[in-house]
Each structure stands twice: as C-alpha cells, then as structure tokens.
Image (cartoon, grey):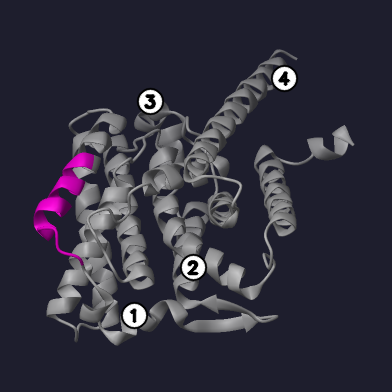
Amino acid sequence: MTQAFGHWSPQTLRLIALALALLATVLFFSTQIDGYLSARMFNRISTSVAVVLPVAVGQAIVVMTRNIDLSVGSILGVVAYVTGQSLGLMPDLHPVLVLAMAMGIGALAGAVNGVLVAWGRVPSIIVTLGTLALFRTFLVEYSDAKTITTASLPKWLVDLPQVTVFSVAGLDVRVTAILAVVACAVVGLSLARLRWARRFYAVGSNPDAAVMAGINAARVAFVAFVISGALAGLSGFIFLAKFGNITVVAGMGFELKSVAAVVVGGVSIMGGSGSMLGVLMGALLVDTIDNSLTRWDLVSEFWRDALLGFLIMAAVTVDTFASRSLARLRAKGGQA
C-alpha cells in the first residue's frame, strides 16, 4: 500500500485528502441537519462559494510569491458599494462594462498594495494590514452611512443570482457559480501553460534564483497583487448581485476565508507551490463547513470563526511538516 501511494505526487495526495474531507463533512452534517442533502442546500453553498472562490484564487497567486493580501475583504466591500452606487446613478450600463468596472476598481486597489510591497519593499503583511483599514475607512467616509439597496439596482443584477445555466439531476448551476469557476479555470490554465504565469512559482520558490535567471521579481509581485485586487473586484460584483443591500461592513471576514481556502487547498504559505484545483476544493470545503455550521443549532457564531482559524493552523502545520520531510528525503537521495 505504501509503495502504491509512493508513486503519487504530494499534490495528488493532498487533493485526495481534500476530497475525502469534503465527503466526510457532507456525510456528517447530513446526519445532523434535516433536509441537508437537498437542492436548496446545494444552491446555497454553490452561490456562496461563487463569492469566495475568485478572491481565494487571487489570494493564492499572492501567496505563491511568498506574500499575503489581508486587504481583500475591504477591497471586496469597496467594489460592491461603489459599483452598486454607480448602477444606481447609471442603471443602463451594460453588464460587461459593470463587471469590467468592478474588476478595474479592485485592480487599482491591488496596485496600491503591489507598489508598496514590490518597490517600497515593505512586508506584505504590514502593507495589507494597513490598506485593510484604509480601504475600509474610505468606504465608511465615502458611503456617508448610506446603504445600497436592491431598489436602486437594475433588475438584471438583482435577478442574476437566480439565473440557471444548466441543471444536473435537479441541481441548478447558477451563472454566478459559472463566473467564479471560469475565473479559477483561466488562472489554473495560465499557471499550467503560460511561461509568464509560471514566474509566480519561480519567485515564490526561490526569489534569488529567479532574479539570477533574469526574472523581474518586483514586477511579478506587483502583478500578483493587481490580479488579487481584480479578482476581489469580481467577488465584489458577485457579492453585490447576491445580497443587493450593501453596507460599510460588506466583505468583512473574507480575508480569513480566502486564506483558509488557500492553505487548506494546498498552496504552500512558504510560496512556490499550489494548484487552482486545490484552491477550488479548499473553498468548497471551507464554505461547506461555514454554511453547515450556520444551520447547526449546536454551534455558536464564535465557533464558526474558531474552526476556520483551526483549519488554517492545521493546514499550515501539515504543510510545514510535509515540506521538511520532503527536504530530508531529497537530501538523503542526493547523498545516496
């Protein structure tokens, strides 16, 4: 049995473990919550994952470069509010332009982080902790305590979360879920097929070697933060469509969810490794647990956040031990 598993890569084993964990989670909650295995619960989780997944994909790109973006929740909130306000003033805007505007605002905010990290050489955790507060403060001041409501939004946006692309065995796959999965797939294919995208791995794996190979590490880090901001903007657009009523607290907590999805999905916090399939499965697992705990009367709101924190610590611990074990095995192999 050990020899059979030995032929599989660590990434494959991690994906199998994630699939088993997701299956175990679903089976457990199906015994605890009435009507859990239903189309309604599927729609609830799939539309919720649609908000989390793009921001987690962007976070993964940043983490691959040995950085972290803690401002994504605030960016999401700013994008949702500004986009909603713009639609209230210009309801005839084409949906494609609205989506481009949302991602553009996010990319601009990400560029602020990128400049400070890449060329200002300030640690990303410090920069994004600061912009987390700055972007949120901007939203509070900009909104003037006013709420965006569904009454001010065009009908196409309000109806968007209910638009079904196709159904499988009675389970509806909504257009927002397709948007999120397409974003994940595009980034995943780019990382696998495009040379410039592989530079995220190179910079995160060994920054000094990447520079010696002629890679502009600062520019790669900057692009990573811009992509993270743009995908947080996409999540902001989906968030606006899903909830409609946007206040100054929109997006709070998504930095924790995105980090949880990324590290649980197998993206090394030390940079240089990870896959978008793992991020997708990580987002599914994290959001399935989150939504299930919401409906489980035995668990309070506090324990939902505590469990997310535990998942992050467990994933990072496993990743650290796995990396050290792999390094020892490689060292022994080299000596042999």
Task: Tell me the magenta residue range.
Answer: 133-147
The first of marks 3 and 1 along the sequence is: 1
Task: Tell me the element at label 1.
Answer: helix
**Left or right of residue 47: residue 196:** left
Q: Residue at x 87, y 34 (%)?
A: 3
Give SS at disc 3. Answer: helix
Name the amino acid, label 3: Asp
Marks 2 and 1 sit apart, C-alpha to C-alpha, by 14 Å
Q: In the rendering, at what x and y percent does residue 26 appear?
A: 69, 56
| Between 246 and 11, the one nearer to me in the picture | 246
Q: Which residue is mark 4?
A: 333
Residue 145 visible: yes
Q: Is residue 52 left or right of residue 110?
A: right
Kindly identify which residue carries mark 2: 47
Can I make out residue 266 in this image? no
Say which amino acid is labelled 4: Gly
Residue found at x 36% / y 35%: 67
Earlier-in-chain disc, 3 versus 4:
3
Tell me the crowding category of disc 1: few under 14, some 14 to 19, or many 20 or more residues within 10 angstroms, Cα based. some
Residue beneath label 1, please?
158
Find residue 47 and report its horizontal and vertical position in percent: 49, 68
Q: CA distance from mark 3 to mark 2?
A: 41 Å
